[in-house]
Image (spheres, rainbow, N blue to C red):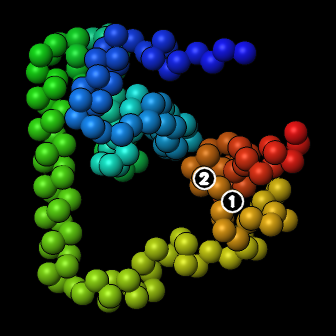
Amino acid sequence: MQIESIYNKMTNSKREVVELLKDLGIKWSYEHPVFVWGENKRPRVWAPDFYLIPFGIYLEVCGSANFDYDYRRKIFDNNGFRVIFLHLYTEPYKWTYHLIRYLQLFTNSRYNKLSEILRKENIIDIWNKEDFCCYNRKFKKEELKDDCKDCKYGKSCKGGCLAVSTSMTGKMHCDPFCLYQIEKQI
């Protein structure tokens, strides 16, 4: 069986973005799914075109003037996702500058925010706060659902990806795409 490359599924615009990311040495993931609440509180799973791993930012490559990108931007913003929209069709030569500039601003902003926090509080005090990383610290194995409830890895994996679990099953802590459960079925 021959596996098709993801590059064959990409548009030319997306391949252009990939070439720039390679040149910049930025690791990325293609169509990394995210859980969002749409209008009317409807749960959805969307897959922005690229996830820039070192930045924690998503890229949407806008390929058409006929698509409502403002709606997608609003939904991503409302759900707390940072997404850069690259309009390659309207700005064939400006999009690279736009992307690089945004990444610089984001990096500087993240550094400045961290510096501000550390000026106000000692890192040890932050780490020792009861609510810091509370999802991990306060997790109890009893919160696991379905197959995860009796799984020997449940305590460490915490039921897998929370977004996938909630969007696919309506419940937290029971990822239906658990590799351990799939492996047991094979």
Amino acid carrying label 2: it is: Cys
Name the image quarter holding residue 97: top left
Label 2: element kind? loop
Label 1: element kind? loop
Tell me the residue at 85%/65% (across/down): 150
The picture places residue 173, in percent across and down from the top left corner, at: 68, 59
Tell me the residue at 46%/74% (across/down): 133
Tell me the residue at 12%/16% (across/down): 93
Name the image quarter holding residue 113: bottom left
Position of 115 compared to 43: left or right?
Answer: left
Amino acid carrying label 1: it is: Gly
Query: Is 99 situated above or below 120?
Result: above
Tell me the residue at 28%/83% (across/down): 123
The residue pinned by badge 2 equals 161
Give the camera-side residue of 89 and 172: 89
Quadrant showing the N terminus: top right
Which disc number belongs to residue 159?
1
Q: What is the crowding at mark 1: few (fewer than 14 residues within 10 Å), some, or many (at least 20)?
A: many
